[in-house]
Structure formats: structure tokens, C-alpha cells
Image: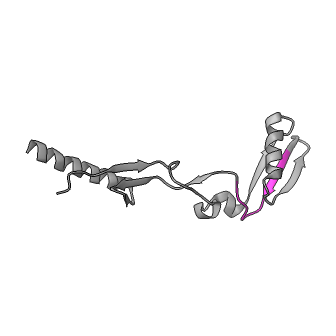
Amino acid sequence: MQSLKHYRILSKHDGPTQSCAEAECENHLHGFKVVLDEGEQMGRMRATYVRQAGRRYHETYDTDRELTIFTFPPGETCFASHYTVAAFLVDNQRHTKADFWVEDFALHQDRIDKQING
């Protein structure tokens, strides 16, 4: 009987990032808009970043609301980071669901308890 097991949970931020396509990102699939107020310093900084990011976009200006609107087409990479989902590992074997990991952990604890306490 195996008495030592290593249980780990890797949070989504511990794993590698995915591309928008790999993550099936809604922005990537359908396109997206970024609306910025360039009257504010943060809005100007973000607009500069968007313009220099190397992505395809169409830029318009809403004169009524004094906002700059960047429209990105489907297939364009968005600005979010897409992390892999959390991983539930037992001795480096991945469980497909958190519930299975919890059950494995509980059963293992029960076996250890029975070995110690009879």
C-alpha cells in the first residue's frame, strides 16, 4: 500500500498562458472595442499603447462623448492574459476534476488513519 502521496493544486496563474485562439477568447472570436477618454492622462497612455501594439484596428472618435474608440476585428489578439485552468495533481498525475482530487485525498487520509489507529 502506498503511504506517501504528493498532492498539489496549481492555480490558474501558476500555469503557462495561452493564446487567444487556444483559450477560445470571446474577443478573439467576435472582435472587440476599446473605448478610451484621451482627455485623461491614463486614457492617453492606454491609447498610445493600443496604437503601438501592432494589432489591426479601426479608430474612430465619438465627438458627443469625447471618447476614442478602437474597434478590433475577429481574429485579432486581445489585451488580456489567458491562463491555463487550475491543475489538480496527485504524484504528478492530473485529475480531470477537483472533486476527484478531493475524493482521492480523503480516501488516502482515511487509509492513513486506519493504519495509525487501527
67 sits to left or right of 102: right
> Vertical placement of 100 versus 112: above or below?
below
Residue 57 at x, y = what percent? 82, 58
Colour approach in the figure: one colour
Direction from residue 1 to residue 55 in the image, left or right: right
Tell me, yes or no, whether the highlighted magenta stretch contains residue 81.
no
Indicate the position of residue 66 as horizontal and vertical percent values.
Answer: 88, 40
For the residue pair 71 and 91, the one nearer the viewer reads as 91
Q: What residue appears at the point 90 percent right and 42 percent down from the top-left corner?
A: 64
Q: Which residues are magenta?
A: 68-78
The answer to if 76 sits in the magenta stretch is yes
Q: Quadrant of the C terminus?
A: top left
Could you say where residue 22 lies in the image, as x and y percent from the top left? 59, 64
Q: Is residue 6 above or below residue 66?
A: below
Determine the residue located farthest toward the top in the rendered image: 40
Q: Residue at x 62, y 51 (%)?
A: 81
Question: In the drawing, does residue 39 fall left or right of residue 93?
Answer: right
Q: Nearer the viewer, residue 90 or 97?
A: 90
87 vs 28, nearest the viewer: 87
- Point out residue 3 in the picture as x, y percentages from the top left corner: 20, 52
- Vertically, is 75 above or below 35? below
